[in-house]
Every structure is written in structure tokens, then in C-alpha cells.
């Protein structure tokens, strides 16, 4: 009989808003396969966790920061918590307790900012490696870390990878880093892709005659929102009927043809109904991020029958596939060319149909099945023993 499988991460895995809904998607996929998926949260309740992190950031204030505005120094220290030994030790203890209470015999660990109890059977699942995130220069925490802290977080990930049955990732791009930068043999690395929530819309009912572009991204800067706005302004001069819908933390907009919808929360059914409607009438998703480890939005667009314009920076090309095009995120001309191409109704429809055809393998049920295959039949094993097995010293 299939044993219980824990889904572990440093937020609440059952919360749709945690890590773009990836852990909750895995849990749903496991349960759709008839597997007893159980959340393993390496975190305190929200307010307690926030209090812990705030205290650690305040305690980390250094003399060199005293001449700066206190708020700036505090935010910098919050970014540097990714390398905090006390926070890592707390997460390790919480992971051990949650793993033991879950009764699971095997685990899918999303993220490597904590460690499960020694002897646990687990696979890891990541969209990128720490090395890739550091190289991108696109994350505040990566820019804030000292050289010593960078070494520490990479080494922590190396140790988590080394103890895994298999290291699962969302793209070939990430897989190459796991092998080249961490020395993990290729036969222990699996590309399992990413899934999409059920936002599908019948392709035949969409009106392709009018170009409707959709941008979905919380991080306006990293998702390249300003460049999308400039390209759209030029496109609209050529195609006056074109429109652009913005979802995420975008600035106030008053440009012709552009409608801002703000953040549409993953855990809010009303917001998700709005997002589903936007996907249902869009003719192209355009998110040419400055860096994109994967981009679940491309998978969601494909499931809804919409082609995408993605980015060449990161692993997005695997998720966009034949259902769209990727462009250099710093090439204005390339972005405008791609948007002009999608402004043609027949072209947009063809990309949408190809995207939809390829979306069948990009469901959380399919991804969960691949993660179970990577575990290799160990899910009926005994649950981890005492929490004292966990090394809580940090690296």
C-alpha cells in the first residue's frame, strides 16, 4: 500500500499563496493520485514567524549600519536572513517536529533553506539553484549577502542535495546547475516540470480578432513591466485595437489601452475568478522577465489556451515550449517584434492551440506522479524517528 508522503517547505504547504502555490499544487496532485499527501511546515504560525524574523533582523544590526536610515539597515538584514544560522536552526527543529507529527514515510522537500531529520527519505524540488539565483543578480537577498554568507547558503543546498534520493527541478536549465555546480550525478537529477491550476478555457470560444495582451507578475521590476509598457505603447500606435491587462504590483497606469488590476491573491476565490476571466479572453501572455527560474504563469496560460512571450534568462524556455516565443529581456526590438507577431490573429491562435495541446503534461497531478517516481517506491517506509537526529547547528 502507498504510504503517506509529506510535502515540506519553509512556509505552510497547504496555503495556495505559499511559493506561488507550488507546494499546495503538489499536495493536490498527490491526493488526485490517491496518495495521502501531508503538509510539513518548517515554520511557526504566521505572526510568530514574523516576530522571530523581525527580532533576528534587529539583533543583526552592525556598527557599520548605524550611519544609515534604520529602516534601510533593517530591510537589508531581513534580506540576509536567508543565511541566518539561528533561523536555519529554528527551521530544522520545526521541520523535524512537523515531519514526525505528519507520520509520512517519505518527503518531497520544496526549497533547501532547512533540513529534514537525518535518515529521512526525500527528494528535493526546486525551480533554480542558489548558484543560479546569485548569478542572476535579480534578488535583494542575493545582493545583500557577504561572500562568506554566499558560500554558506550554497554549501547548505549542496548538503541537502547530497542527502536526497533524487534532485527534481522544473527545467533542463536548473538541472544543468545541479550537476555542474553541485556535483550531483546526472542519474540522480530529474526534470519534472511545473503544474498549473485549473484555469482552462475552451480555445474555440476566444475572440482572436482583437489583440489582448496579458501581463501577470508580482515583482514589476524583475518581470520587466516597464519594458512591456514601452513595447505596448509602440505596438498600439501600429495596432490601435490592441489592449494590455496588468496583474501584480504594477504602478498606477493611465496609458491608452492599458488596464491595471493590481494583485489578484492566490488564496482569494473572487480574485482568481477575475484572473481566470483575463486568461480566458487574452490572446497572448507577455512576461519577458529579466530573470525567470521557471514561470508558472506560462503553464497557466497554456492550460487556458494562450500562447506566451517569455524570456531567455532562466528556465522559462522549457515551460513556454512550442506554445510561444522567448526573447532577450533587454532587447526592446525583439520584444516589439514578438508582440507584433502575436498581434496577428491567426498567429496568436496557432500559438494558443499549440500551447493548449502541450498543457496536458503540465498539471500538478502529472508533476506529482513524476515526483513519486523519483522517490522510487520508498513511500511506505517508516516515518523519521526522533527530532534529535536533525543537525541544528547550521552550516
Image (cartoon, grey):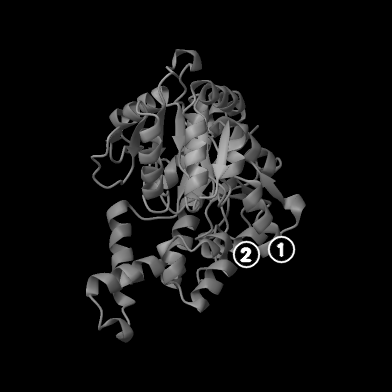
Q: Which residue lies under the disc numbered 1?
A: 183
- Near-viewer residue (261 or 165): 261
Position of residue 211 relative to residue 182, above or below, is above
Tags 2 and 1 touching, CB below 8 Å: yes
* Residue visible at 63% across and 41% down in the picture: 192
- Near-viewer residue (65 or 254): 254
Q: Classify 10 Å Cα crowding around label 2: few (below 14), some (14-19), many (20 and above).
A: some
Q: Which mark is residue 158?
A: 2
**x and y, in percent, of residue 304 in the image:** 48, 25
Position of residue 152 relative to residue 112, above or below, is below
Question: What's the CA distance linking mark 2 and mark 1?
Answer: 8 Å
Is residue 111 rendered to the left or right of residue 276? right
- Near-viewer residue (45 or 289): 289
Q: Classify 10 Å Cα crowding around label 1: few (below 14), some (14-19), many (20 and above).
A: few
- Occupied quadrant, residue 64: bottom left
Name the element at disc 1.
Answer: loop
Furthest toward the top, the residue is 205
Amino acid at each position: 500500500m502507498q504510504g503517506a508522503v509529506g510535502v515540506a517547505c519553509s512556509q505552510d504547504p497547504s496555503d495556495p499563496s505559499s511559493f506561488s502555490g507550488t507546494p499546495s499544487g503538489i499536495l493536490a496532485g498527490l491526493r488526485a493520485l490517491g496518495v495521502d499527501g501531508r503538509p510539513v511546515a518548517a515554520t511557526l504560525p504566521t505572526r510568530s514567524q514574523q516576530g522571530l524574523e523581525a527580532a533576528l533582523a534587529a539583533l543583526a544590526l552592525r556598527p557599520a549600519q548605524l550611519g544609515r536610515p534604520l529602516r534601510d539597515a533593517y530591510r537589508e538584514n531581513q534580506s540576509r536572513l536567508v543565511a541566518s544560522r539561528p533561523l536555519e536552526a529554528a527551521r530544522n527543529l520545526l521541520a523535524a517536529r512537523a515531519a514526525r507529527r505528519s507520520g509520512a514515510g517519505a518527503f518531497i522537500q520544496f526549497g533547501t533553506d532547512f533540513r529534514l531529520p537525518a535518515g529521512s527519505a526525500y527528494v528535493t524540488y526546486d525551480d533554480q539553484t542558489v548558484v543560479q539565483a546569485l548569478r542572476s543578480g535579480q534578488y535583494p537577498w542575493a545582493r545583500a549577502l557577504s561572500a562568506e554568507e554566499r558560500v554558506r547558503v550554497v554549501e547548505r543546498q549542496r548538503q541537502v542535495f547530497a542527502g536526497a534520493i533524487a534532485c527534481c527541478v522544473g527545467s533542463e536549465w536548473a538541472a544543468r546547475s545541479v550537476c555542474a555546480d553541485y556535483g550531483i550525478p546526472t542519474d540522480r537529477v530529474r526534470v519534472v516540470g511545473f503544474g498549473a491550476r485549473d484555469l482552462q478555457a475552451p480555445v474555440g470560444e476566444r475572440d482572436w480578432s482583437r489583440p489582448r495582451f496579458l501581463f501577470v507578475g508580482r515583482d514589476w521590476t524583475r518581470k520587466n513591466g516597464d519594458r512591456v509598457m514601452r513595447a505596448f505603447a509602440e505596438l498600439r500606435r501600429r495596432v490601435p485595437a490592441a489592449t494590455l491587462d496588468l496583474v501584480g504590483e504594477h504602478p498606477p497606469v493611465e496609458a491608452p489601452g492599458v488596464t491595471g488590476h493590481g494583485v489578484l491573491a492566490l488564496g482569494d476565490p473572487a480574485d482568481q475568478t477575475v484572473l481566470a476571466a483575463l486568461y480566458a479572453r487574452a490572446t497572448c501572455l507577455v512576461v519577458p522577465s529579466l530573470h525567470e527560474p521557471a514561470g508558472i504563469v506560462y503553464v497557466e496560460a497554456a492550460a487556458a489556451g494562450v500562447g506566451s512571450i517569455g524570456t531567455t534568462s532562466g528556465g522559462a524556455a522549457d515551460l513556454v515550449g512550442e506554445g510561444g516565443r522567448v526573447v532577450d529581456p533587454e532587447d526592446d526590438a525583439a520584444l516589439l517584434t514578438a508582440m507584433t507577431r502575436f498581434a496577428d490573429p491567426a498567429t496568436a491562435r496557432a500559438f494558443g492551440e499549440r500551447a493548449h495541446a502541450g498543457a496536458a503534461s503540465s498539471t500538478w497531478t502529472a508533476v506529482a506522479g513524476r515526483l513519486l517516481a523519483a522517490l522510487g517506491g520508498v513511500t511506505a517506509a517508516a516515518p523519521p524517528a526522533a527530532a534529535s537526529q536533525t543537525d541544528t547547528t547550521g552550516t
